[in-house]
Image (cartoon, helix red, strand yellow):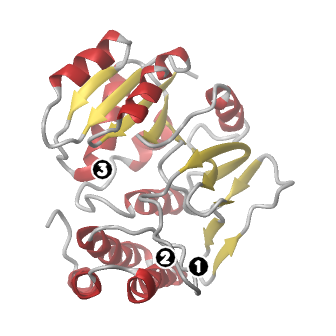
Amino acid sequence: MNHGTLITLYKPTTEQVEHLLDLPRLSPVVVAVDNSPAVDEQLHARLRAHGVDVVVNRNRGGIAGAFNAGVQFLIDRGCDVFFIFDQDSYIPDDYFDRMLEGCAAVGDPRFLVGPRIFNLNFNRDLPLFTVRRWSAQITRINDGAHGLLRCSVIISSGTAISLEAYRELGQFREDFFIDHVDAEYCMRAQAHGVPVCVNADVSLPHELGKPPVRQHWPQVEIFDQSALRHYYAARNCILVARDYWRRYPAMLLINLITLKHVAFVLLHGKEKRTKLKAILCGVTDGLRGRYGRV
């Protein structure tokens, strides 16, 4: 498998840049898709000098647009497996070899394979989320789990996507812009019979958003974010459900995530009124079927 790696950037920190500079040692093709609003020519020159190609995207199409631009770059470079990472993912030296072993074990040239994600914000693995027609299940990954675990939704960071899967499924939905872009793509894969798996033998430490605020009891496993991100999260939950509820009625339960956002804001959030209003606007626009950037 000829693999390549794309990293999405948005105002990266010095530490994140240093980690990125080391990636060409591990992956034959590395492209950074910069979604920052301003072009940092000095940063880009430094990346290119260390073997990291750069695509300037300026947030066109949001995170989905960055994914599409990066994947197209990797296709043009002859890659047939694409690894996607956020800028705050820290990749172990043996990551690609072990993930490619898992990809080869899928038994289908079309696949989406993600690692076991260790959520640094809460010091635990993300659970498996599986949707069938009339049921949805959240399952913890046991310490002794190994091999490929089938599921319905994996987060984008660390995920390997095969060229065959991308050709069948098409591009990421830029009208989602940000939040649940990966959930929509995974549900699209499941609807097309493309395997979606977690490779339990590979762990990727990952910080999901900003570190959580200090929470009194009860804790809510949602990270603090802007009112705009609360809006997109609420709206796009509904849009994913709208797109897939006929095939998977249980997908309507994805909107329970929005209730967690509401609970977090009420219990622990700052600017409660602004953020609750943003969530309400997101729910309203989702019910109206409004897509795109706001």
Q: Give the residue pinned by disc 2.
A: 247
Q: Quadrant of the C terminus?
A: bottom left
Instruction: Kindly identify the amino acid type of the residue bearing the numbered disc 1.
Output: Arg
Distance (Cα) linking label 3 and label 1:
29 Å
Q: Give the residue pinned by disc 3.
A: 63
Taking the spot 14% from the left edge, 32% from the top edge, the residue there is: 39
Q: Secondary structure at mark 1?
A: loop
In the displayed orientation, state which residue is furthest to the right. 144
**Residue 280, horizontal then vertical, whole percent:** 26, 88
Nearer the camera: disc 3 or disc 2? 3
**Residue 55, horizontal then vertical, whole percent:** 24, 28
Distance (Cα) linking label 1 and label 2:
7 Å
Instruction: Say whether marks 3 and 2 touch (CB < 8 Å).
Output: no
Q: Give the residue pinned by disc 1.
A: 133
Distance (Cα) linking label 3 and label 2:
26 Å
Residue 267, numbered label = none
Instruction: Kindly identify the amino acid type of the residue bearing the numbered disc 3.
Output: Ile
Q: Residues within 10 Å of mark 1 (few under 14, many from 20)?
A: few
Q: Is residue 18 above or below residue 275?
A: above
Q: Quadrant of the N terminus?
A: top right
Taking the spot 36% from the left edge, 19% from the top edge, the residue there is: 52
**Residue 178, horizontal then vertical, whole percent:** 30, 59
Instruction: Kindly identify the amino acid type of the residue bearing the numbered disc 2.
Output: Arg
Q: Secondary structure at mark 3?
A: helix
Nearer the camera: disc 3 or disc 1? 3
Q: Is residue 243 above or below residue 110?
A: below
Could you tell which of marks 1 and 2 lies nearer the N-terminus?
A: 1
**Residue 98, horizontal then vertical, whole percent:** 70, 31
Q: 240 and 83: which one is in front? A: 83
